[in-house]
Amino acid sequence: SQQGEEDPQALSIQEGENATMNCSYKTSINNLQWYRQNSGRGLVHLILIRSNEREKHSGRLRVTLDTSKKSSSLLITASRAADTASYFCATDAVQGAQKLVFGQGTRLTINP
Amino acid sequence: SAVISQKPSRDICQRGTSLTIQCQVDSQVTMMFWYRQQPGQSLTLIATANQGSEATYESGFVIDKFPISRPNLTFSTLTVSNMSPEDSSIYLCSVEIQGDEQYFGPGTRLTVT
């Protein structure tokens, strides 16, 4: 069964606005990773946040992690049309096993 | 990061046949994985490809259906055997490098008719 639940399933915003996607998971984790997938192609690694971290930044991306609530959020600031894609969170739910369990994903559409 | 390539990028196959997908990495990696993404769905781990030993399969996936080879630290193959339309999916390999980060290949889009 899937570890993660992502919210919302779909998000449509205007270019320049900020986009926030949320991910919840069920078990203790070592880390959580966010990926982008364009039109059913390969996954692009965006950012990894470890269980002892609360926030990480990479360019226009900001990821938070709340282990007490078993949730994470991905914020994309100043969105661009090229950000249109599906975004997935993935957790390694079993310590040392290095297996990723993926959420269902959020389909983000940026309208020009 | 790593440069990961997959062959073929896509294929259309008839039911009952088999397809072997190749995954090549530009550096030696310990951990390689194979995932399946069914249409409109998220990714599901098929197996961990172990170098020099049999792959470790996840629940619901068996070696007879998805045999995997890992002859060295830069290459792996996944075979989808005796295909049916339900096997139509994107198949992706991934590698773990730089600690816990996993990087994915471009995927192989398989359509079974």
Image (cartoon, rainbow, N blue to C red):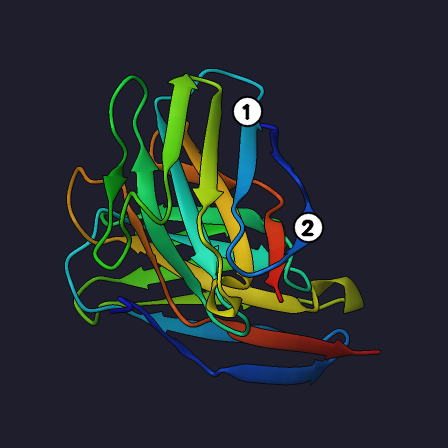
> In which chain is the residue bearing label 1?
B
- A100, B35: nearer the viewer: B35
Q: Position of residue A81 (x, y in %)?
A: 79, 68
* Image: A106 above or below A13: above
| Furthest-right residue in this view | A112
Q: Position of residue B47 (x, y in %)?
A: 31, 43
Q: Amino acid at mark 2?
A: Arg
> In which chain is the residue bearing label 2?
B
- Crowd around label 1: few <14 · some 14–19 · many ≥20 (10 Å): many
Residue highlighted by disc 1? B25
Q: Position of residue A70 (x, y in %)?
A: 22, 68
Residue A84 sits in quarter: bottom right
Residue highlighted by disc 2? B10
Element under disc 1: strand
In this picture, residue A64 sits left or right of residue A52: right
In this picture, residue A79 sits left or right of residue B42: right
Q: Position of residue B98 (x, y in %)?
A: 41, 27
Q: Image point 42% across, 72% down: which residue?
A: A104
Cα–Cα span, label 2 and label 1: 19 Å
Residue B1 shows up from this direction? no
Q: Image point 41% across, 38% down: which residue?
A: B101
